[in-house]
Every structure is written in C-alpha cells, then in structure tokens.
C-alpha cells in the first residue's frame, strides 16, 4: 500500500516553460550525471533514506529549553519535541533537507499550517554530530547564552520567505494566504534550468527535423555568453541583492523572479554595494541599517561572508577590465577526462589545475615561469608564498564554520587592515609577524607607503591582536588560520595553542568550534577533549587545560619564541599584555548573513 505524501512539501510542478532535469537526461547523460554528483543538486531534497545524512536512530538531544528525540517510523524521519522540558511532547515529520556537503538542516511539517519549521538542530557531516542550529552561525542566537527555542520559533516560514529564492529552481512562495498557499518550484535543488533557462522550447525544437539553429538558440549555455552575462547566471544567487522595488519583491514571492540566464541581471534587481562600484546601486538609500552592511561586508565594501562571491567578482579589475567570469576557474559539469573522483571535483567544482597558479597564469602568461613568479612574490617558487591565491585571494571571507577565499582579487595592503580590521594575506600566513613587519616588506618590495602604526600593531603579531582583541569575525578567521597547514609552514605550529585555548571560551559558539578544530591540528593536541556547546564551567576548564598542556610541552625545550607572539624567553605567556588585549576585545554583536 502506498504511503500518504509528505505533508507541507512544496509542490514540484514545472511551469512557465520549465520542464525539470529528468527531461534533459536522455540527450545529455554525461552532463546530467555530473550535475547529479554536485552539491547544487542536493541543496534541497525530499527527506528520504538517500538524502538524510543525520543520525535518526533514536537520538536524544537536550538543550537549554528543548528536549528532542530523533527517530524513524514507517520509513519516515520523525522529531519528538518537548518545549521548556514539559512532559507534553509533540511529534513532527521531517519533509525536506537543506545542504549535504558540510552540514544539513531539516524542515518539519506543522499541519494545518502550511509553513515549514526548521529543526532547531543541524547535523555536521564531517564531525558526525548534532549541534544546536544557532551554534553553527555567528549571530546573536549563536552566542553562549543562545536559546534554541527562541531560534526555533523565529524561523518558522523562513523557507518560503527567503530560502526558496536560491535553494530551488524557479521557486514561487505564493504567499497570498500564508495559511493555505502551497509554495511551488520547478524543481527542488539547483537543477539544469537554473543555469540554462527554461527548457521546453529547446526540447520542442530538437524534436523538429527542420529546427536547425533554433535547437541551439532556444537554450542558454553560460559558457558561450559574454563574461559579464555568464557570471550573472551565478550572481542570481551568489550576490547580495535587493528587488528593484517593493512591487518587484512581491511579484517574486508570487511568481518567482523574472531573471532568466542570458538576461541582464541588473534589469532584474539591484546589486547591494557599500562602496566601490556604486554605479551598480545608483538609488542606494542614504542610510541602510547597519546589520545589513556589517553582516555582509567589510567597511570598505569587500564581501565578508561566503556564498556571495559575485559581489566580490564585480569589484575585481580582472572582471571590470578583463574577461574573468566564474567559469574562468569553475565548471558545473566535470569533464569526462578528469581523473579526480567525483566527490573531489564536487567539493569546489574547480576545473583541473585551477586550485593552483594555472587559474591566474591562463591570463597572466608572464607568470608561467618559476623564476618570474619568485621574483614577483619574493618567495621560493615552489612555496605557498608563491601561490597567487594566497596573496591575491586570501581567506578573508567567513561561512560554514570556516574561512574561505575572497573572490575580490586584490593585493595586500597594511593600510586596508588598519582601516577595516580585515586580515591581510601576509599576516594570515606569517601569523607570528606584526603589521609593522608586513608594512616594511611591502614598502621594500612594492613601494607601498609606510603607514603610521599604533604601538600594539608595531610590536605584537597581528594574528594575536585579531584573536584577543578582534571582533567575532576576526576571531573566527584567525582561529581557522591557526590551523591552516600553509600558515604552519610559514610561522611554525608550536606557539598558537594558548590563543586558541582562550577562544575555547569565546562568547560565540562558532568561534569555539573553529578554535577547537584548529587546536587539534597542533602537535600534542590531537586528542584534546572538549565540547564547544558544553556548560560554561567546562569551557573555562578547557581554557586552563589547553594552556597547561601547551606549557608542559614547552618546559625544558629552550625553544626561541618571537617576542611579538607574547611569549617570553622562558616560554611563558606575557600575561599582563595578554589580559590587557583581552579586556579590549570588540564584543559588539555581529549578525553574519550567511
């Protein structure tokens, strides 16, 4: 006997010329196959044995104000919840998932209300553990005293109001009557037609023997578009944008957005910019609420959060004055001759070789010579310091519990770090060096003017300042860099533990998680036991324990430490300076818009 359909599931019904990916498979089996291996396909899925990665084997989770039991019943994934630890429980059905690569979120049906709810826990795939959903983000609800229940209640309806726009193909929230309307999509996940446009006309043309050129022109191939229109296909999701008007926003909710691949994205929406290319946002209001800006951008307008790479690309000279597009480095379909396993390709969807200097040398051919590269970088040609990415696309973007590369190609400048607080490429590798050291090198090698530096910036390693005194975003990026192999090669790995240890009691859960992961990559800490969502007393004890383990490893070693790392010649932390910087920590709330 067939089971009843999952309640509240959005209606998959291609309209407006959309046909669904299954219609593409027979003629394009290789492209369909590689897309099927991608995380675009699995961005949004019906909850099934194949799609659910979290453990639902009678798992019990207890938080500040929620008790949860995860189990399976009659082939369905179920969630039993007790609010405020009440003996009264309620059972929900998981109907849909979001994500599958790094973490996965779960959408619950709540009949008769049509709006989906988010399970207040999410599953981390690599760590194979459940965490409170707010703990995976740098937001006010992701702080140490966050309330799972508050987040749970505030996110009802989020899918149809926000997520449907980019996590599906041709999503239509249709909120005319929130209690009755059923959101509709051409397809769950990001499928063929999200990038190639509606396929009905193409299919009809290919069935006619006299179609000729029409069979090709009736569908869009982003690789054959001008570089700006090609990049805009990705930019429809991977940017910070606003509807052109309130009426346009309402139309999107009811009918889906009007952009189709090949169109001018600027005609459909306004690109949100803070500085830089303000021509892209000519009607920018004189004042936009601070959370929007600080949650997405550094103060100079460079994008600060992941998933918004097009916002960086459009500010890049390689795009503005050249022909760089997303497809210069990335590919949405793995080539048949690519020897990499599909899972390796899918992790970044990079073309072969594009994880190295080939990405830049394909245009900057003068650097296709090791001697020229070494002369330009002032590093050995085969070192991480001569990788174009590390200098010109450093890890200054945050999201998914890690640092990712900036997609605004630029050169490191100490003046930028002073103005914005953004870590620069040099000090993200040379973690043990000061901004003064970096400024001197950039002045010597590239004739950059020497900025005037405050005493701490002149005498204390920049990474130490960011870790102890920085805001939550700086602390997260620095904690990640403390565990980065390239940085270990440049600055060693025997001095970072006290600073990572301090971050184990950070007020933001996500910062604590990153710090613990990096700490375990240091020698002697591989099995360091700690729970980043543990009780305050446990976290405080972990700070002390991390310092103790590190101190014991240094006793009797007589290793020289750079004084700028706040470690004295005896191998002990300069506690007065350490605590002074900690007292000056930037604790202003941050809401990163991942």
Image: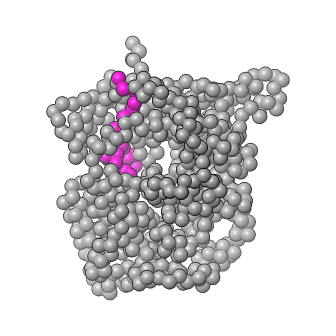
Q: Work out whether residue 208 can be spotted.
A: yes
Q: Please, is residue 73 above or below residue 476 in the view?
A: above
Which residue occupies the foreground of this view, 258 or 199?
A: 258
Residue 482 against residue 87 in the figure, above or below: below
Compare residues 535 and 353 and report the one nearer the observer: 535
Pinpoint residue 153: horizontal percent, then vertical percent. Answer: 31, 39
Residue sticking out furthest to the front:
286
- Farthest bottom residue in view: 569
How many numbered markers are drawn?
0
Taking the magenta stretch, the answer to whether it contains residue 125 is: yes
x and y percentages locating residue 484 in the rendered image: 45, 65
Q: Where are the magenta residues, as a range? A: 112-137
Residue at 32% x, 35% y: name it. 56
Q: Is 212 positioned to the left or the right of 350 in the image?
A: right
Q: Is residue 161 above or below residue 235?
A: above
Q: Residue at x 60, y 39 (%)?
A: 34
> Is residue 454 or residue 309 the one in the foreground?
454
| 390 on left or right of 119 | right
């Amino acid at each position: 006997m067939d089971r009843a359909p999952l309640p509240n599931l959005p209606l998959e019904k291609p309209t407006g010329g959309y046909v669904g990916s299954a219609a593409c498979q027979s003629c394009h089996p290789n492209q369909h196959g590689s897309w099927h291996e991608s995380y675009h396909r699995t961005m949004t899925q019906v909850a099934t044995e194949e799609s659910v990665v979290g453990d639902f084997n009678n798992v019990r989770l207890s938080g500040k104000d929620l008790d949860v039991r995860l189990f399976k019943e009659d082939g369905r994934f179920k969630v039993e919840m007790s609010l405020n630890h009440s003996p009264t429980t309620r059972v929900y059905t998981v109907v849909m998932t979001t994500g599958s690569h790094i973490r996965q979120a779960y959408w619950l049906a709540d009949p008769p209300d049509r709006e989906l709810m988010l399970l207040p826990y999410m599953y981390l795939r690599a760590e194979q553990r459940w965490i409170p959903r707010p703990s995976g983000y740098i937001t006010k609800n992701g702080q140490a005293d966050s309330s799972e229940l508050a987040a749970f209640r505030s996110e009802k309806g989020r899918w149809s109001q926000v997520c449907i726009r980019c996590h599906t193909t041709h999503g239509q929230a249709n909120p005319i009557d929130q209690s009755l309307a059923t959101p509709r999509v051409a397809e769950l996940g990001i499928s063929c037609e999200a990038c190639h446009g509606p396929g009905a006309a193409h299919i009809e043309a290919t069935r006619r023997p006299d179609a000729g050129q029409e069979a090709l022109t009736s569908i869009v191939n982003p690789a054959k578009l001008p570089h700006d229109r090609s990049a805009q296909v990705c930019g429809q999701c991977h940017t910070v944008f606003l509807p052109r008007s309130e009426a346009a926003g309402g139309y999107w909710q009811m009918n889906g957005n009007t952009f189709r691949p090949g169109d001018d994205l600027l005609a459909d929406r306004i690109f949100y910019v803070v500085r830089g290319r303000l021509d892209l946002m000519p009607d920018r209001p004189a004042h936009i609420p601070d959370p929007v800006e600080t949650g997405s951008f550094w103060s100079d307008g460079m994008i600060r959060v992941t998933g918004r790479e097009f916002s960086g690309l459009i500010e890049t000279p390689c795009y503005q004055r050249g022909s760089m597009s997303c497809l210069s480095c990335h590919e949405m379909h793995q080539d048949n001759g690519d020897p990499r396993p599909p899972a390796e390709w899918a992790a970044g969807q990079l073309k072969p070789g594009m994880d190295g200097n080939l990405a830049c040398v394909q245009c900057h051919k003068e650097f296709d010579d090791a001697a020229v590269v070494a002369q330009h970088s002032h590093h050995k040609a085969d070192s991480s310091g001569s990788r174009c990415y590390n200098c010109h696309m450093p890890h200054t973007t945050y999201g998914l519990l890690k640092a990712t590369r900036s997609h605004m190609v630029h050169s490191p400048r100490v003046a930028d770090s002073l103005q914005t607080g953004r870590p620069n490429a040099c000090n993200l590798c040379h973690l043990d060096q000061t901004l003064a050291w970096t400024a001197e090198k950039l002045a010597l090698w590239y004739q950059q003017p020497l900025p005037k530096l405050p005493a701490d910036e002149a005498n204390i390693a920049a990474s130490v300042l960011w870790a102890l005194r920085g805001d939550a975003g700086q602390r997260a990026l620095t904690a990640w860099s403390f565990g980065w192999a390239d940085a270990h090669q440049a600055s060693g790995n025997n001095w970072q533990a006290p600073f990572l240890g301090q971050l184990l009691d950070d007020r933001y859960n996500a910062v604590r998680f990153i710090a613990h992961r990096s700490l375990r990559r240091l020698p002697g800490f591989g099995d360091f036991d700690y729970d980043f969502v543990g009780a305050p007393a446990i976290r405080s004890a972990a700070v002390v324990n991390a310092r103790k383990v590190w101190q014991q490893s240094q006793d009797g070693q007589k290793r020289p430490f750079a004084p700028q790392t706040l470690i004295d010649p005896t191998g002990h932390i300069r506690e007065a300076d350490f605590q002074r910087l900690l007292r000056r920590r930037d604790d202003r709330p941050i809401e990163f818009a991942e």
